[in-house]
Amino acid sequence: MSGKTNKKQNKKSFDVYFFEAFEEEARFIRKHLKGEIKFGLTNRTIQESGYRNPPSSLISVRTQSIIPAHWQDKLDGVLSRTTGYDNLLNFKNSIHKNVICGYLDEYATRSVAEHAIMVMLSLMRHLPRQLYQMKSFNRDGITGKECKGKNLLVVGVGRIGSEIAGIAKGLGMNVKGVDIVKKYDFISYTEKYEGIRWADVIICAMDLNESNYHYFNYDLLKKAKKGAIFINIARGEHSPLKDMLKLLKERKLSGIGLDVF
């Protein structure tokens, strides 16, 4: 049946199949593709779905799906509904057939940047603790910090990173960036170790590649100011969870905001 997960369907049953389709996205797909295209969808990744073979010759994924190499002979194309595409590269590097793969060149730049700033403000103002203590109206230990005059280091100054920097400057923060390519004139660029020691807040907005896997590890972030905040809105592989937990337990960082795992 169109729009529903059914493992008994063969690949000819669907024109396209969507993996990792969140509730809001699934509603949008059903609304706009109804009657036009035969589609199937699930909120699961490929590996979670249990499919041994692709349910359609054209599939769409997000970044958490691992595309099996043995699917290559049954696929005509793969579209990632994200700007991240390392899973597509891994698939392409493991196959011999020329399967067309695509990703989104632009994806919610302003929304992601505002989300990063929201996470920063939540941590600086102790919002999680405020919400927890509101149950007993306990107002101890919830005095936060203002943004004005604080130092923000943005690591990965592309579209999203530059947008984060612009918003932060509007809040009165001192902003520096770390990036191989220095293409924004309004950014003061610095070296990563110098930037880490300088920053009150560190935001990761990098793409993911072999050179920056586990970039924000314990050895790097332990060099940060005591009480600094680290936020990752890029990819989970940048910041290993065991290192994040160690940094919090040792009180090297006062807060960590992870939008990715």
Image (cartoon, rainbow, N blue to C red):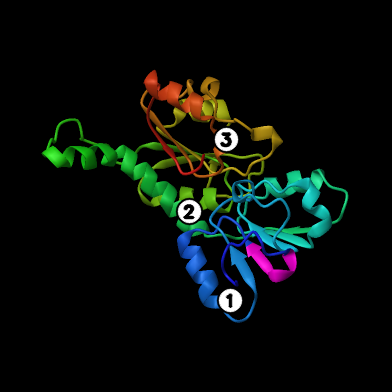
Residue denoted by label 1: 33
* Secondary structure of the residue carrying numbered label 2: helix
Amino acid found under the numbered disc labelled 2: Val
Name above or below for residue 212 compared with residue 43: above
- Which residue is drawn at the image coordinates 78% and 52% (left, top)? 71
Q: Where is residue 225 in the image (x, y as percent from the top left)?
A: 41, 24
What separation in Å lies between label 2 and label 3 (alpha carbons)?
Answer: 17 Å
Residue placed most toward the observer, 165 or 106: 106
What separation in Å lies between label 1 and label 2 (alpha carbons)?
Answer: 26 Å
Amino acid found under the numbered disc labelled 3: His
Q: Where is residue 43 in the image (x, y as percent from the top left)?
A: 53, 56
- Which residue is drawn at the image coordinates 35% and 46% (left, top)? 172
Name above or below for residue 244 compared with residue 93: above
Residue denoted by label 3: 238
Q: Position of residue 111 (x, y in %)?
A: 46, 58
Q: What stretch is highlighted in magenta?
A: 11-17
Is residue 125 in view?
no
Residue placed most toward the observer, 9 or 143: 9
